[in-house]
Image (spheres, rainbow, N blue to C red):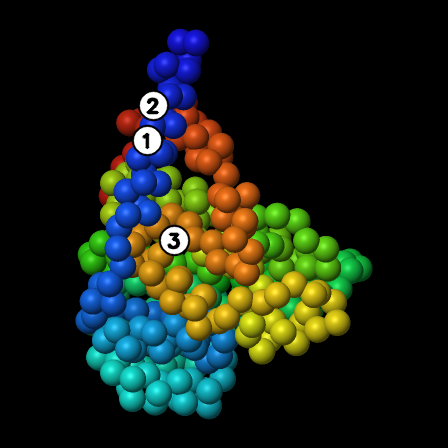
Amino acid sequence: MAFMKKYLLPALGLLLAYNYYSANEKFTPEMLQGKKVIVTGASKGIGEEMAYHLARMGAHVVLTARSKENLQKVVSHCLELGAASAHYIAGTMEDMTFAEQFVAKAGKLLGGLDMLILNHITNTSLNFFHNDIHHVRKSMEVNFLSYVVLSAAALPMLKQSNGSIVVVSSLAGKMAHPLIAPYSASKFALDGFFSSIRKEYSVAKVNVSITLCVLGLINTDTAMKAVSGVMTKQAAPKEECALEIIKGAALRQEEIYYDSSLWTSFLLGNPGRRVMEFLSLTYFNTDRFINTSEFP
């Protein structure tokens, strides 16, 4: 009973208050006007749609993906839609040197950075796992490690702007699915790493938000081709998905869920985990190891 009064009830109260106030905060497109935003995986699919939404809102964007030709078309359309500025830098996130250098180049083009949207993935297909270690390694490097490299390179600029990191993940990073073990592993890793970093930023008073975007099946060409003949689930629209990601990021929400099922966020939102994470901080003597100068 003493434990409940001292820890559990206050934690539940804070959780309910957080959910109430965050749910009542309103998004307006003006929140993105003039903001300096990087979008990865922006040559097609959800990334392309996010670039167009940001352009309509008057943001400055730097886009990256592998296809130079596709990026040129997306940038051109962004300028037509009203982007404050739009640039692209083509390259592959299999190259960690490119990932780090890309952030530096984008920062110079933008003159700073307000939001880093991490959206790219390596090509994957639905298959049983048959000891393809190379595919596991590549999935972890592109879908996870490059996200870490990009966010670390961007952090100094994001600290200056009190900016945001947006991590596009998947239901496959919250629950088990067959046929996508390497992909799922990389998405679970994103949750573990960035949720932990979010706690570190909170303890160290680093005012950079991290939004984890948990997406279901979205009707991108790549996803529809991958699940053809394998899954019968209804896909959600990519245009609306892209807008929901931007809204959640602008409101600095910790997690957003977007799926064709209305039950997804209720079943996977997991308030129990939030309570446990809140309580776990009481076991750390943070004064002994916090040194904000360690953050670049």
Query: Which residue is drawn at the image coordinates 22% and 54% (left, top)?
Result: 162
Vertical arrangement, residue 196 with respect to residue 64, above or below: above
Vertical arrangement, residue 61 with respect to residue 271, above or below: below
Vertical arrangement, residue 202 with respect to residue 129, above or below: above
Identify residue type, mark 1: Leu
Nearer-the-camera pick, 132 or 248: 248
Between discs 3 and 2, the one toward the N terminus: 2
* Residue 155 horizontal side relative to residue 141, left or right: left
Spatial separation of the CA atoms under disc 1 and disc 3: 19 Å
Query: Which residue is drawn at the image coordinates 28% and 27% (left, top)?
Result: 287
Identify residue type, mark 3: Thr
Report x, y in % for residue 263: 54, 49
Residue highlighted by disc 1: 14
Report x, y in % for residue 253: 35, 50
Report x, y in % for residue 240: 43, 68
Nearer-the-camera pick, 40 or 233: 233
Residue 103 appears in the figure: yes
Neighbor class of circle 3 (other Cα within 10 Å; few <14, some 14-19, many 20+) is many
Q: Outermost residue toward the front?
A: 262
* Residue 105 falls in image quadrant: bottom left
Vertical arrangement, residue 208 with respect to residue 105, above or below: above
**Nearest-to-viewer mark from 1 and 3:** 1
The reply to whether dot 1 and dot 2 touch (C-beta < 8 Å) is yes
Q: Quadrant of the N terminus?
A: top left
Identify residue type, mark 2: Pro
Nearer-the-camera pick, 131 or 56: 56
Residue highlighted by disc 2: 10
Neighbor class of circle 2 (other Cα within 10 Å; few <14, some 14-19, many 20+) is some
Residue highlighted by disc 3: 211
**Nearest-to-viewer mark from 3 and 2:** 2
Query: Which residue is drawn at the image coordinates 22% and 79% (left, top)?
Result: 84
